[in-house]
Image (spheres, helix red, strand yellow):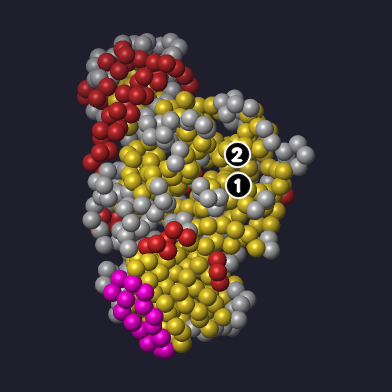
């Protein structure tokens, strides 16, 4: 059967919202089953969980060109439909200078890159409500890594290879072209069988991405359909593509492919055996060079968190990556990127002046109920950008230097078992604390977040039990061995990012307390230097 005929039977393109190809049978998800016409014997209408699918049973081959055309029509409808979610709701928890979505759920940063004089930062977006459904890529651009513009949706889950989500990936800047790689995620049949393909799209300027379709369609041997999030680097004359993968023995591993031309990819093998049983899946690989060494940042699932308070399966780590003579990959020297609550799926890129800057998702999989859902129909955001460097083999992370230009009025306070009302939740705070001190932030008479320097165990405890948090762990800890502890804290209405001892450790957290909870208090004595921060132009404010 021709695609056009099936679309007609489905009640016309306005009744079609998904195209699928389970076992080669063209299927269309229809909005209203009542609009489906009388079906010939080689087509059926059936319910697949909560959806209605009209399925072509004729066995006629379907051309990829006609599938592509149908994808463009579905895409046009999707773009129209989500316009209503592209307008920001007003909400007290909205950040002033972090990237957040206008509505819906935001997760991983994607395609973070400098290309043709502009910074491009895409992100995963579920426009319809605070849940993980059918991911889109939103495109934002910036000249200065501070003021961001919303450039609309770049990829929609419109095609047979990405119908349940244009999942995460990275970008490559070529002379006249930006090429993005992403994972096409589809769910087939009653069992919601996952089908994963690695896809690409191109554009001159990063806007109007034109899908090229799947470049890697088959799974490599020994992995499940959990293989995703392509990262591409160029090394010694050829391209390398990295994917986070799960083996059929349920081990997280790194899959590597090679290519001469970015279009044809040859599987090399799975790497990471030297880490042993290190979780059941590795998501979002990022591979980059820093001061002459390669690093591998990733999001392992199901590893031992190393802390009794850290009970979630979703962790963040970075390892040194070395290439052998034949480009074989060795991983070593694991470190935690962020000891806080909400740091996942980070991506990095090189700025035009050569700095390595990283952005993470401030949120975690499996958590989507927070006060912002009810008050503004949005949840999660991206983290502040952090500059990476290495000192004696240790990774150092500092807030991007551009943030300093947001500083306005500065105030100094000397607190000794006392408190001060900052009258704002958007600030940068610097202090040096002695062991035994306890700093409370975003505080009113009922709510606060607490940073406690536990003298006995020489660790910093970040406690958000007394906040309006609705989901997630409430305590995090990091061991420190310095005589005093220096803190640089970035606050933005519903988040705190704590940079410790000059970037030796970082703790990121979403913190929900009432709008008027603007006090800071200290048990112990210390000087506080507090900058109010100006709001740049943000992508959810058009
Ligand atoms: C990580 C992740 C990625 C996937 C994306 C889907 O948060 O699960 O592995 O590509 O989110 O939105």
Magenta span has 423? Answer: yes
Looking at the image, which is closer to me, 144 or 506?
A: 144
The label on residue 288 is 1
The residue drawn where x is 67% and y is 51% is 293
The residue drawn where x is 31% and y is 12% is 5
Q: Are dots 1 and 2 in contact, CB under 8 Å?
A: yes
Ranked by sequence position, the earlier of labels 1 and 2 is 2
Residue 382: percent from left, percent from top = 41, 53
Is the residue 312 above or below the residue 73 in the image?
A: below
The span shown in magenta is: 409-424
* Among the 4 quarters of the image, the one containing residue 8: top left
Which residue is outermost to the bottom?
416
What is the CA distance from the residue labelled 1 to the residue labelled 2? 8 Å
Residue 339: percent from left, percent from top = 53, 64
> Around disc 1, counting alpha carbons within 10 Å, would you say few (fewer than 14), some (14 to 19), or many (20 or more)?
many
Using residue 475 as the reference point, say whether residue 150 is left or right of it.
Answer: left
Is the residue 98 above or below the residue 9 in the image?
A: below
Ligand 1 within 8 angstroms of badge 1 C-beta: no
Residue 1: percent from left, percent from top = 37, 10
Is the residue 122 above or below the residue 318 in the image?
A: above
| Residue named by callout 2 | 233
Asked if one can make out residue 196 in the rendered structure from this viewpoint, the answer is no
């Amino acid at each position: 059967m021709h695609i056009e005929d099936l679309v007609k039977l489905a009640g016309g393109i306005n009744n079609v919202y998904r195209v699928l190809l389970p076992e080669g049978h063209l299927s269309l998800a229809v909005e209203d089953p009542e609009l489906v016409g009388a079906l010939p014997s080689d087509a059926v209408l059936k319910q697949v969980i909560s959806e209605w699918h009209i399925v072509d049973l004729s066995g006629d081959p379907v051309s990829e060109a006609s599938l592509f055309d149908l994808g463009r029509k579905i895409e046009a409808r999707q773009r129209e439909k989500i316009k209503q979610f592209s307008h920001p709701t007003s909400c007290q928890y909205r950040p002033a200078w972090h990237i957040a979505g206008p509505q819906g759920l935001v997760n991983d940063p994607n395609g973070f890159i400098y290309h043709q004089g502009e910074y491009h930062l895409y992100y995963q977006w579920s426009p319809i409500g605070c849940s993980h459904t059918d991911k889109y890529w939103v495109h934002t651009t910036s000249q200065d890594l501070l003021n961001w513009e919303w450039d609309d949706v770049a990829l929609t889950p419109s095609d047979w290879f990405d119908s349940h989500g244009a999942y995460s990936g990275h970008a490559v800047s070529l002379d006249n072209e930006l090429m993005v790689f992403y994972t096409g995620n589809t769910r087939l049949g009653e069992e919601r069988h996952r089908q994963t393909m690695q896809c690409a799209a191109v554009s001159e300027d990063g806007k109007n991405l034109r899908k090229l379709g799947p470049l890697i369609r088959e799974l490599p041997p020994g992995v499940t359909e959990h293989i995703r999030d392509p990262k591409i680097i160029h090394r010694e004359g050829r391209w390398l593509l990295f994917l986070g993968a799960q083996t059929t023995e349920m081990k997280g591993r790194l899959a590597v492919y090679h290519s001469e031309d970015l279009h044809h990819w040859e599987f090399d093998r799975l790497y990471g055996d030297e880490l042993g049983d290190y979780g059941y899946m590795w998501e979002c690989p990022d591979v980059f060079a820093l001061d002459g060494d390669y690093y591998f940042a990733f999001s392992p699932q199901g590893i031992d968190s190393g802390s009794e308070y850290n009970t979630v399966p979703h962790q963040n780590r970075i390892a040194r990556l070395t290439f052998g003579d034949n480009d074989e990959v060795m991983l070593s020297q694991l470190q935690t990127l962020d000891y806080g609550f909400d740091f996942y799926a980070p991506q990095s890129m090189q700025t035009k002046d050569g700095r390595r800057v990283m952005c993470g998702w401030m949120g975690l999989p499996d958590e989507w109920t927070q006060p912002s859902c009810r008050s503004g129909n949005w949840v999660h955001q991206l983290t502040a950008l952090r500059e990476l460097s290495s000192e004696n083999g240790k990774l150092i992370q500092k807030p991007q230097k551009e943030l300093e230009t947001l500083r306005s009025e500065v105030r100094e306070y000397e607190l000794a078992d006392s408190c001060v009302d900052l009258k704002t939740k958007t600030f940068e705070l610097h202090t040096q604390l002695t062991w035994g001190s306890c700093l409370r932030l975003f505080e009113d008479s009922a709510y606060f977040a607490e940073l406690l320097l536990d003298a006995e165990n020489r660790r910093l405890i970040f406690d958000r039990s007394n906040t309006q948090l609705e989901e997630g762990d409430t305590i995090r800890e990091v061991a420190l061995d310095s005589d005093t502890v220096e803190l640089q804290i970035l606050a933005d209405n519903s988040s705190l990012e704590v940079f410790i001892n000059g970037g030796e450790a970082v703790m990121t957290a979403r913190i929900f307390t009432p709008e008027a909870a603007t006090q800071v208090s200290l048990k112990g004595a210390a000087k506080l230097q507090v900058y109010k921060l100006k709001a740049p132009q943000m992508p959810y404010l058009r």
